[in-house]
Image (tube, rainbow, N blue to C red):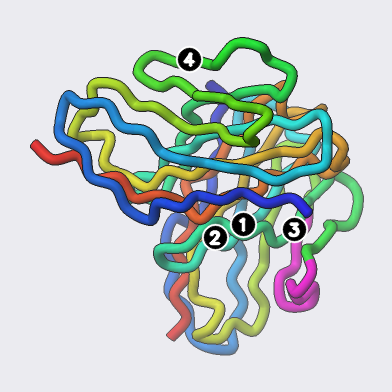
Amino acid sequence: GAVVSQHPSRVICKSGTSVKIECRSLDFQATTMFWYRQFPKKSLMLMATSNEGSKATYEQGVEKDKFLINHASLTLSTLTVTSAHPEDSSFYICSAQRGGWLGDTEAFFGQGTRLTVV
Amino acid sequence: AQKITQTQPGMFVQEKEAVTLDCTYDTSDQSYGLFWYKQPSSGEMIFLIYQGSYDEQNATEGRYSLNFQKARKSANLVISASQLGDSAMYFCAMSPRMDSSYKLIFGSGTRLLVRP
């Protein structure tokens, strides 16, 4: 199956600093990537949809200036948590799909990034 | 509104027995896809099985089968011959076809524990 690589898998940062998380599709071109956030023992909540070459579409309630998403190429999307605070600590996971309707192709997930802000 | 409901926060099953994880969904779309994912403690999301809304036959993938009842809007996952490695969180998800973003809507999940 297709591989999506997410890096880093774990990161600890100081409050006020920014953290960049990368999501790469290794063996296919991902026209669309999704960023999810998962709180402990909770479900995945979609944060934003990232399309190559265009601005990301954010879900209601997600701060665009806090969570910067860039989809610079068909194989790379990045999520930057700016001026991180302890409440931003969470598990962030990306997914990528080749294109077309999801029913025609499964979404491939990265390994996730556990962010801890101290 | 699109919604996925998983009413079982936790389930136990004896090793080698079958278990059914419940999932109901709510959508006004005629075309949609239903998915099940497994999330072990490591956090990765592992795709298990897919069912299209127009598929007449229930999907099967090895020990996994999806009991799709369209009229009742349910898409239960059946795991046969449970193994200890099946202990994990299981998420039901839906992708509405009419939503051009093709995003996945997840249920709250069911934690399955397989007893030896």
**Distance between the Cα atoms at labels 4 and 2?**
30 Å
Q: Is residue A63 magenta?
A: yes
Q: Is residue B55 left or right of residue A60?
A: left
Q: Is residue A57 magenta?
A: no
| Residue plotted at (48% across, 67% down) | A39
The magenta span reads: A60-70
| Residue plotted at (15% across, 30% down) | B15
Chain hosting mark 4: B
Q: Which one is in front in this view, the residue at disc 3 or the one at disc 4? A: 4
Tell me the amino acid under the disc marked 3: Ala
**Distance between the Cα atoms at labels 2 and 1?**
6 Å
Q: Is residue A26 left or right of residue A77?
A: left
**Distance between the Cα atoms at labels 3 and 2?**
12 Å
Label 2 with label 1: CB-CB less than 8 Å? yes
Tell me the amino acid under the disc marked 4: Thr
Q: Which residue is mark 1?
A: A36
Where residue B21 appears, as percent x and y from the top left, is 40, 38
| Residue plotted at (49% across, 75% down) | A89
Q: Which residue is mark 2?
A: A92
Q: Which residue is mark 3?
A: A48
Where residue B109 appears, as percent x and y from the top left, is 46, 51
Label 3 with label 2: CB-CB less than 8 Å? no
- Asked if labels 3 and 4 share a chain, the reply is no
Label 1 sits on a secondary structure element that is strand
